[in-house]
Image (cartoon, rainbow, N blue to C red):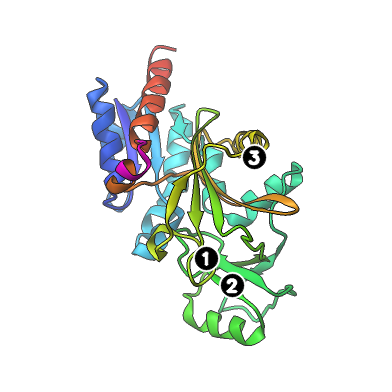
Amino acid sequence: MMGILYESDEWSSYALAENVRNMGVDVYLFNTEEEIDHEKLFSCCLVVNRVFASSQFRGHQRSLKKMPEIISLLKEKAIPMINPYQAHEYEISKTLSTKTLENHGIAVPKVFGIVARSTAQRVKAEYPCILKPNCGGRTNFTYIIHNEDEFRKAMEEIPDIEMIEEEYIKPVFGYVTRIEVIDRECQLVLKRSVAANGLSAYHLGSTYERYDDCSGKIKETAMRAMDILEIETGSMDIIENEQGFFIIDVNSVSNASEDNTEMFQFDLMMETAKYVVKKYKDSEFA
């Protein structure tokens, strides 16, 4: 049996499970907001992690708190997880993933530091800068900060969580490059337009177009970054400018909505299912 850990009623998690079943593999969905049936968990030959860093903004902090225990149990029983255990640490810490890539010579924004409402500590940042949750996603509580007044106003709006301040890299070409990587291949490369507030996100009204002529160097770097972070299937955002390109965000849990499949003419959950089923069969009969 294959297990899928999930924390919210995303279409994508159910679509992944349906595709896996259609490929002849039994699958059980574990809702990490509820008590986990350990007997069923231990009956799995492979577990797929779909607990998003953004879960805390949906009131699902319990899932994030439970993941270390779940990972410990899986390690104890030698049950492999996709993505591997360490990848979850990169999913929930923008600082860790960014600094890890930087240490391996990959161009990323400069990290000025971490701040929170409950601490008086102030990071010496250069303006403009990006202020965003250290554990988060989908542009929740993400700001482009130009001065101290904007910083103070933003800090009044956010919950009391760790926020990362980092260098602002302007998307001068009007788009952010989005890459979906599965099994060391760039399966989908898109241009996502920049919204009126300077950020880029589907829910902000950004539009997408295929980016089939994305440079080989960018795609090679994307695959290398995923190898460094031990992410077998995930996504990243890249900003290109006159100086080159910078990886600004990496996710070890990729998401898609049903309309994305028709829009892109690419079924991310189907392709993910093909990969996890292959890994499942390898683990089952190893």
Q: Position of residue 96 (x, y in %)?
A: 64, 52
Please name the amino acid that badge 3 sits on.
Ile
* Image location of residue 8, percent across then percent down: 30, 53
Ranked by sequence position, the earlier of labels 1 and 2 is: 2
Percent from the top left, x then y, of residue 67? 43, 47
Disc 3 is placed on an element classified as: helix
Front position in the image: 88 or 186: 186
Give me the disc on residue 88: none
Q: Quickly name the residue at label 3.
A: 218
Measured in 3D between alpha carbons, the distance from the residue under mark 1 to the one under mark 2, in whole angstroms, is 8 Å
User: Which tag, 3 or 1, sits closer to the chain's start?
Assistant: 1
Tell me, yes or no, whether the two marked residues, 1 and 2, touch with CB atoms within 8 Å. yes
Is the residue marked by circle 1 packed among few (<14), some (14-19), or many (20+) residues within 10 Å? some
Q: Which region of the structure is painted magenta?
A: 262-266
Q: Earlier in the sequence, mark 3 or mark 2?
A: 2
Q: Is residue 9 magenta?
A: no
Q: Which mark is residue 199?
A: 1
Q: Main secondary structure of the magenta part?
A: helix
Front tag of 3 and 2:
3
The kind of residue on which mark 2 rests is Ile
* Spatial CA span between label 3 and label 2: 25 Å
